[in-house]
Amino acid sequence: MPRTGSADLPLHYGKAPPWLFQRMVKLARAMTIAIVEDYGPEEVLRRMADPVWFQAFGCLLGFDWHSSGLTTTVSGALKEGLKDIESELGLYVAGGKGAASRKTPGEIQQVSESLGRDLSFLAYASRMAAKVDSAALQDGYQLYHHSFLFTARGQWAVVQQGMNTETRYARRYHWLGEKLKDFVCEPHSAIAAQRREPEVLNLVAAEGDANRQAIAFIAREEHPEKVVRDVEKLKHLSFPERHHIVTAEDISLQHLNKVLLSTYEQRPESFEALLALKGVGARTLRALSLAAELVYGAPASLRDPAAYSFAHGGKDGHPYPVNRRTYDETIAFLETALRRAGLGQQDKVEALRRLRQL
């Protein structure tokens, strides 16, 4: 199951009760050890990067299948369960929810020093995954959780989540390093979700390559003041209806001028290099994307990359029939790992019961 992508979940607040979280930690630890022993640590990354498997794993651990809290709790339980055996497994978990997500680079550095290896490229991967899903893919979800999983050999995966407080939904994004070909062109090999948003600025769409190239060209412009003047003119235009996602209020000429002066000095050679620069965020990219389209004729994509329905489809055929093969493979893999896990008989029986309820 090589799919990676995102999942939409109802936004729930609160925490898992201690008695449940303690059991989730124990079960997540045992399951992960069993998978590593049979398949190696890289397989854990592949599984965590699969939204179908991740969702089923959360159900197996006993958390509400339809809750946004499944993402943060499962990631937290896994990190807690592996914290004293990471070096033994060759598998590490960094980041987390809120302030913990900002500790990811430091945690990667600690592992780098303990292994005596340069893992700075992992910090870059972590930062770019977060930057893409917060600035380059503007779908209305603000990131608040970033879990970065990696091996001693340098393979990595990301599970991160954003919230939309207006719709009260959360969206989960999955990344898998071994499947990634380009950080800024269709970085999710597949995306699964319950709903599509009507207004999305998708600067990582394949069909938006010309827009990305034009944005990078504008950022290298020898005369930043010329770009600011062009954008100022755009503020007085009546935007076509398809540009309703970008408004005059979105464009801060003062901030844009400051950013362009910085990008001119650093002269990013590509859109990825521009996105990686400090200070280049969602508002800057909206203004540059609009300028790239209206001045240089390079349209941006407004396509939400999320597909309908995460998991395995619906029993009534909506939004598509259940994929029985994928469904059976997910259950079989989890059952095998569970039977191999070093758990007491009662814990296994209860976990198997939850799994069969899926």
Image: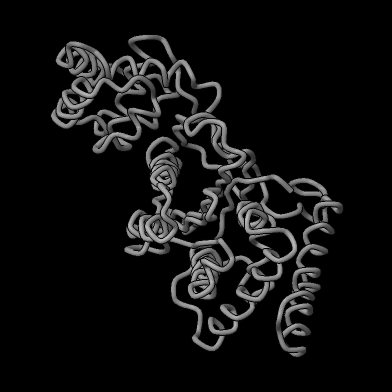
Answer left or right for 32 relative to 106. right
Tell me if I can see residue 217 in this picture: yes
- Residue at (20%, 29%) from the top-left corner? 259
Residue 155 at what x, y percent from top left? 55, 48
Give the farthest residue toward the front.
Answer: 116
Residue 189 at what x, y percent from top left? 62, 38
Question: Between 221 and 235, which is closer to the camera in this rendering?
Answer: 221
Quarter holding the C terminus is bottom right
- Residue at (52%, 66%) from the top-left corner? 87
Seen in the picture, residue 160 relative to 185 is either above or below; the reply is below
Question: Based on the displayed image, in which of its 4 quarters is residue 357 positioned?
Answer: bottom right
Answer left or right for 45 relative to 152. right
Colour pattern of the rendering: one colour
Residue 205 at what x, y percent from top left? 53, 28
Residue 9 at what x, y percent from top left? 56, 59
Question: Between 252 and 80, which is closer to the camera in this rendering?
Answer: 80
Question: Between 104 and 5, which is closer to the camera in this rendering?
Answer: 104
Seen in the picture, residue 156 relative to 238 is either above or below; the reply is below
Question: Based on the displayed image, in which of its 4 quarters is residue 290 positioned?
Answer: top left
Question: Based on the displayed image, in which of its 4 quarters is residue 111 positioned?
Answer: bottom left
Tell me if I can see residue 59 in this picture: no
